[in-house]
Image (cartoon, helix red, strand yellow):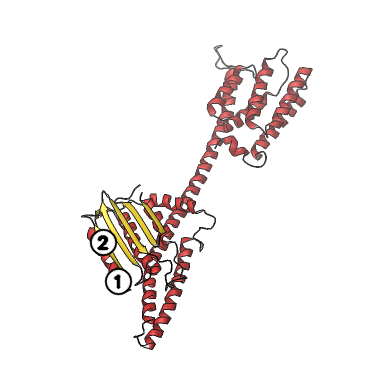
Amino acid sequence: MTMLHTLRRGSGPHPAVTAIAVLDCVLVVVEMAANRPADPLSWLVFAVQLTVCAGLAFAPTPACALSLAICVAAAMLPGSPSFCALLAFPTLGLLAYLTSPAWTCLAAIALSLAPTGTGVSLSVGGDGSDVRMTGFTVNVVCYLIAVGVGVSLRRRSDARRERDRRAVYERSLRELEQVRRNRRLAKALHDSVTRELSSISMLAWQLGRNDDADPAVREAMDVMYRDARSALDHVHEVIDLIDGTTPDGAMPGVTGADADDEATDAARRSDPSPEAVDRMDELRRLVDAEQRSITVLGFSGTSSVHGASAVMDERTRETAFDLIREIYANIIRHAMPGDDGYMVMVDVRDGGLAITQTNTVPETAPRHPLEGVRHGLGLDAHRRAVEQLGGVLRTRCEDGEWFLHAELPLSAAG
């Protein structure tokens, strides 16, 4: 941002520039009163100077350059017309504030070369030797002082704006870091609490419809089923509050793309992941545990893990393991036990991790026990996490079959 743009970004002239314009006009009027113009050319020069000074508030840089040019031209005109030479000092100071100091110093030297001042003669000692300061020297010193004042004020202004900019930048970093923490917390709640509540709801629904069970147990299971469904809805409301989203998943005042960019930028500024280690055994244990859990709920399907080793850092492990948990949670939420089959395959190969999941979705499926319960934005959050690592997550549902495929690099990107 240029200094001129900073001074003129308001709806009207900047107060500081207006004050200098008024000062210049006063100097011209005082000069006219002190040295009354004796010829038409002098009146013309004063009128032009006064006009340029008035225009200083509206076009500072061009007016400054024109005012200095008038001083030089008037000093060199034949007949030596009267003019206000004092305008050069505030004009040079303002020009140094608005533009490059180098150009302003050149302008000061050019003004000093013109016959706009007088020399000062000083006699030192009694031996008759004189030390004479020429008009050029006096003018250069005085003009450079004016330039120095303008440069000093500009540097102070630049330093103040830099402090303000850094304060805004640091505040933005803190806000983005808070967004990142909130999203991680919301994701953790979704991946853990809602998974268990969905299992409780499904198990209670099954036991409540078991004709062989005791009526009191069936009634208790119906109550548990209703309470678990209600808890699921309340948990998603809490997740929305933490994540800062509305029920439709949008952040108030922020588009989905902007929110994703913010979360991505915040994640890339986070600390690097710990050293990568082989997590193949841990991966197999996770898939086996999830397989056993949904088998107890009456789901029929297969799960498999292929590969010799899975060396990954903590960030990749967290993203991959959370996605696997979400996949099994979605089977519970959307598939019908006993009716819909599923398949989950985890394949470690070529420096990457591929996760594939399918399950049937009959068009005439019976009413699902968790139908109507809010399920949040689980896969959308996992898609963002996968993409932040440089991976991809694709889903589709067609011809009565749900398909999910994700590919992740074994080391986090960026």
Foreground of the two, 325 or 91 = 325
State the residue at coordinates (71%, 22%): 83
Task: Report whether residue 113 is seen.
Answer: yes
| Rendering coords of residue 137 (x, y %) | 57, 19
- Quarter where residue 404 is shown: bottom left
Foreground of the two, 144 or 240 = 240
Give the secondary structure at mark 1: helix
| Rendering coords of residue 119 (x, y %) | 62, 17
Foreground of the two, 372 or 385 = 372
Give the farthest residue toward the bottom.
Answer: 215
Give the farthest residue toward the left.
Answer: 308
- Quarter where residue 231 is shown: bottom left
Density class for disc 1 (Cα within 10 Å; few <14, some 14-19, many ≥20) is some
Disc 2 residue type (three-letter): Ser
Left or right position of 42 against 400: right
Which image quarter holds the N terminus?
top right
Residue picked out by circle 1: 295
Residue picked out by circle 2: 304
State the residue at coordinates (64%, 32%): 60
Disc 1 residue type (three-letter): Thr
Foreground of the two, 360 or 87 = 360
Give the secondary structure at mark 2: strand
The mark nearer the N terminus, 1 or 2, is 1
Badge 1 vs badge 2, beta-carbon distance below 8 Å? no
Q: Real-space Cα distance between discs 1 and 2?
A: 14 Å
| Rendering coords of residue 66 (x, y %) | 66, 25
Q: Is residue 387 above or below residue 212?
A: above
Density class for disc 2 (Cα within 10 Å; few <14, some 14-19, many ≥20) is few
| Rendering coords of residue 326 (x, y %) | 36, 63
